[in-house]
Amino acid sequence: MEDKRTLRKKYLAARANLDPKKRSGASRIIAQHALSWPLYRSVKVTLLYASFREEVETWDLIRESLKRGKIVLLPRTFVEEKTLRLYQIMRPEKDLSPGYAGILEPRPDLPEATRPPEIIFVPGVAFDVHGGRLGYGGGYYDRLLKEYPEAIRVGLAFGVQICPRLPLEPHDQLMDFLITEEGLIRTRCGPSP
């Protein structure tokens, strides 16, 4: 089995090589799959992320979730503590500003979230159908997911990011579901949808 560094390079390249129009179209389809999912429609508090570079674009999902009356949380990165903290946003175009590595994050003057997320949408470099996730190497999401064990964990990915099996370490947190342009995938550790 290839090591994490090799796999990270391979899957980042696969994602980057997607045609930008195809990537945008697939992102819209992924958002629609999420929005039409009965389980997602039933939750009130959702944690999303501001997509960056070639990640699955989350702007449609953020805006539509707000329109539907959901409480939308986004993370802010605290590098010194190696943690993510959650903040409620209401107006993405005004509530976000460039943060760590230029990623859009909730502005520092916003109050921290007071309610825990019921569902967490997670970015990643690669995922597998067993629930494995390969992140960017900082461990931020693994630490965050450990804080909210009751939340449903959903990896958002393009089909080219799904691999047969990822090498996992004890601290790696598993996904319950994956959503790609092909639809919803319940992982081996996920509850019934």
Image: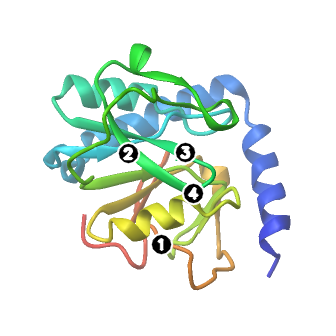
Q: CA distance from mark 2 to mark 1?
A: 20 Å
Question: Earlier along the polypeptide chain: callout 4 or callout 1?
Answer: 4
Q: Tell me, for residue 92, which label it has, or none.
A: none
The one of 33 and 173 positioned closer to us in this rendering: 173
Q: Which residue carries the number 2 mark?
A: 86
- In the displayed structure image, the side of residue 144 where residue 39 appears, left or right: left
- Name the residue that disc number 4 marks: 81
Relative to 48, does residue 116 appear above or below in the rendering?
Answer: below
* Residue 8 occupies quadrant: bottom right
Q: Residues within 10 Å of mark 4 (few under 14, many from 20)?
A: few
> Circle 2 — which element?
strand
- 161 in relation to 93, above or below: below
User: In the image, what residue occupies the spot 62% across and 50% down?
Assistant: 79
Nearer the observer: mark 3 or 4; the answer is 4
Label 2 and label 3: CA atoms lie apart by 9 Å
Horizontal placement of 42 versus 126: left or right? left
Q: Is residue 117 among what the camera can see? A: yes
Residue at x 62%, y 34% (from the top left corner) = 52
* Percent of width and height locating residue 159: 60, 51
Q: Quadrant of the N terminus?
A: bottom right
Residues at discs 3 and 4 in contact (Cβ within 8 Å): no
The CA span between labels 4 and 1 is 22 Å
Q: Earlier in the sequence, mark 3 or mark 1?
A: 3
Q: Which residue is mark 1?
A: 174
Q: Secondary structure at mark 3?
A: strand
Q: Amino acid at mark 2?
A: Leu
- Distance from the alpha carbon under mark 3 to that under mark 4: 9 Å
Query: Label 3, on which residue?
Result: 77
Say if residue 186 shows up in the picture. Answer: no
